[in-house]
Image (cartoon, rainbow, N blue to C red):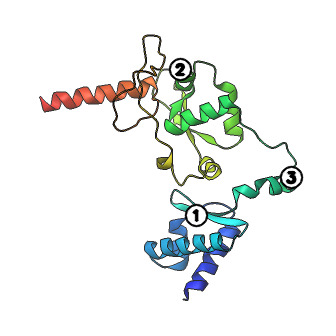
Amino acid sequence: MEINQKKSIIEAILFAAGRPVNKSEIILALEITEEDIENIIKSMQEEYKKEERGIELIKIEDAYQLCTKKELYEYIYPILDKRNKPNLSNAALETLAIIAYNPKITRPEIEAIRGVSADACVYKLLEYGLIQEDGKIDLPGKPMSYKTTNEFLRMFGYNSLDELPQLPRYKLDENKQIVIDDLLEEGKPEAPMPEREIEENKEENDNNEKKMN
């Protein structure tokens, strides 16, 4: 099978699917190796860029999707959707960032980090499909946890959560306020972490120390 025919088949599959298509599905359809798929996809992505097309081929974790270029959104939205253009408030963006950096976080933990109720923001993010429920946590009351969706990755242009910008490490004072003038010494950056994860990490470190002793 010629390379151009393979490209045509992949393009047809992605166009017809209208959703992220897993790499394994494409491999099964074409009966070629994972390396071949990745090389073909990379070539197609370059072609879309060079030809200044209105669509692009994006990767979302282990899946691929054809979508319109985000810079053309303002021309497409009025035609395809008559609703008001969705806007996220600063509070919703803060909540979304907390969830992105802390997968499987619960609503009380989000509120502990932000210091205010997160109900409205969580409902709005669920409505837009940017987050989803991720099962109940084994804590008192069995609270629901949340994580971001592939729609979040697609909207913000990330292939995976590993591409999120790294956050600086910080310290909190006795009032649980960030100490700006006393940042931790340089090392691996880390994101804000709910108290549950901090306690779990402390317990794990204590267990490791006992094993070493």
**Observer-nearest of 46 and 19:** 46
**Observer-nearest of 77 and 27:** 77
Residue 212 visible in the shown view: yes
Residue that mark 2 sits on = 112
Residue that mark 1 sits on = 64
Looking at the image, residue 205 lies above or below residue 35? above
Q: Is residue 127 left or right of residue 172?
A: right
Indicate the quadrant containing the N terminus: top left, top right, bottom left or bottom right: bottom right
Mark 1, Cα crowd under 10 Å, few <14 / some 14-19 / many 20+, is many
Secondary structure beneath disc 3? helix
Q: Is residue 68 left or right of residue 171?
A: right
Q: Earlier in the sequence, mark 3 or mark 2?
A: 3
Q: Earlier in the sequence, mark 2 or mark 1?
A: 1
Q: Which mark is residue 78?
A: 3
Indicate the quadrant containing the C terminus: top left, top right, bottom left or bottom right: top left
Q: Residue at x 14, y 32 (%)?
A: 212
